[in-house]
Structures are given as structure tokens and as C-alpha cells.
Amino acid sequence: MANAPMTIFQVAGRAMSAQLLRMNTTASNLANAGGVAGSAEAAYKTMKPVFRTSFDAASGMSTVDVEKVVTAGEAPAKRYDPNNPMADKDGNIFEAAVDETRELVDMMETARSYQNNVEVMQTAKSLIIDTLKLGR
Amino acid sequence: MSGDSLFGVHGAALEVRSQRMGVLASNIANASTPGFKARDIDFKSALASLETDGAGGIDAATKYRVPTQTSMDGNTVELNQEQTAFAENAVQYQTTLSFLNGRISQVTRALKGD
């Protein structure tokens, strides 16, 4: 089945998986917002998926794949807090580099994209079922 | 070619509508992929070339969409437009189906002779 033409269900289904992965990274980012670490390396950094179009020449349709998940965004913020148990020998802690506003906006866009693909799938399904009932 | 066949133009029309549904679904799926260029099928020319050149004719009528507003990541999908086109195409598909259904019941009635 490797070279079978892509169906509309695969187009919408794979797009939904990609959006779900994006939602997962957003959830991880938000969960780690405000977390602190003892070094800049150990501090949490924002994760972002990289989407890439996957074109199927046999059907002329294209869907989405997640190429990779990268750490993006700013460097962790250094703050002087010697009383923190996580502080390093100079008394500094490193706060996770998560922009919460951007993550929430991203989450809304992801949810909307996911819903659009669900809608596409439902419409395609009902039309295909109607086509199968042709002449009955 | 299709004028004298059982279903007239509606068989080819259903084919084009189905292809267009796939192309529009691809656009919606790639709404957040950087650099993706939205495409669409021109129904009139697709139908004309399908009747002259066969199945390959639809590809020739598939064109890139001209965006009304360009985005910074090079993506030319405008979701509101795509959703409208998709809904429109779904209704047109259903219309073609009912034309076909009408033709089928007409022929069946004629064959039964009642």
C-alpha cells in the first residue's frame, strides 16, 4: 500500500496528527513556564514543531508531516536568588524561557486548525457515503 | 464525447468536484505550514479538458491561488476563503449526485415500464 494514492482521509488525518503534536508541545511549554533550574543548560526551553508539506503526485493532494521538534525562543533568564535551593554557586537561578502569551495564541490557532480538519473529514465522509448510495 | 453517454456531463463533473474537494482539503490541512502555496481547480476549464484529454486534464486546470494578503512565512492559504470554497464545492457535489440519482431512477423507470 506504500504507493497507493493518498485519500482525503489521510490528508485530514495526518494534518490532525500534526496539529495534535503541536498542541502537545504547547502543553509542555505551558506546563514548564515558571520552572527554574541551576544552570542555563538545564533550564527548560520552548519546544516548537516544524511542519512540512508532503505532496502525493498520484492523487495531486498534499498533507502535513512534522519534520522535527526544535527548541526555539529566547535564552533562559538569569535571576539572582541565593535563597533558592536550585541556585548555583554564584546564587543565580535560570528561569524557563517560555512566552506564555505566545503559547496561548498558538494553542488557539492549533485548536482551530484541528477543528477545520475534523470538519473536512466529516464532510468528505458524508459525501462519499452519499456517492455509495447512488441509484438506491 | 459525454453528450451521448448515459449520464451526460455529470459523470465528469463529479470527477472534477471530487478532485477539487481533495485540493481544498490539502489547502486546509496546510493552513499552518510555512511556504505552502494554496491551489485550486478552475471547474470550467477542468471539465472542458477532462472531456478532451481524459483524466490528465484536471492537473492542467489546477492553478495556484493569488493571495489577497501575503503572509510573512510565505503561506498563501486564507482559511476563510478555503472554507467557503470547500462548503460550496460540497453543495455542488451533492447537486451533481442528485442529478445522477434522477437520471438513474428515470432510466430504471423506463426499463421497468411502469
Image (cartoon, coloured by chain):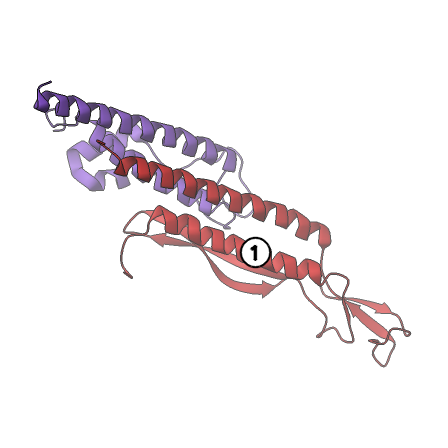
Q: Position of residue B35 (x, y in %)?
A: 48, 49
A12 left or right, relative to A30: left
Q: Name the residue at the right extreme.
A: A83
Q: Which residue is mark 1?
A: A22
Give the structural element (helix, strand or loop) at label 1: helix
Farthest residue to the bottom: give it: A89
Location of the C terminus of chain A (image quadrant): top left
Left or right of A74: which side holds B109?
Answer: left
Q: Colour of chain B?
A: purple
Vertical comparison of A24 with B68: above or below: below
> Residue A79, located in which quarter of the rendered image?
bottom right
Location of the N terminus of chain A (image quadrant): bottom left
Q: How far across and down, in percent of the image, does residue A97 sit? A: 72, 62
- The residue positioned farthest toward the front in the image shown: B114
> Is residue B61 in sight in this rendering?
no
Q: Quadrant of residue B13?
A: top left
Of residue A15 and residue A93, the one placed in the foreground of this image is A15
Chain letter belonging to callout 1: A
Residue beneath the point at 73% across and 61% down: A33
Q: Residue at x 28, y 26 (%)?
A: B98
Who is closer to the viewer here, B9 or A71?
Answer: B9
> Percent position (x, y) of residue B37?
43, 44
Residue type, numbered disc 1? Arg
Say which residue appears at 22% left-offset and 28% top-offset. B10
Circle 1 Cα neighbour tier, 10 Å, few/some/many (<14 / 14–19 / ≥20): many
Visual hue assigned to chain A = red
Q: Is residue B4 left or right of residue A3?
A: left
Side (left or right) of B17 relative to A65: left
Q: Position of residue B12 (x, y in %)?
A: 21, 32
Q: How many marks?
A: 1
Residue drawn at 29 percent across, 48 percent down: A59
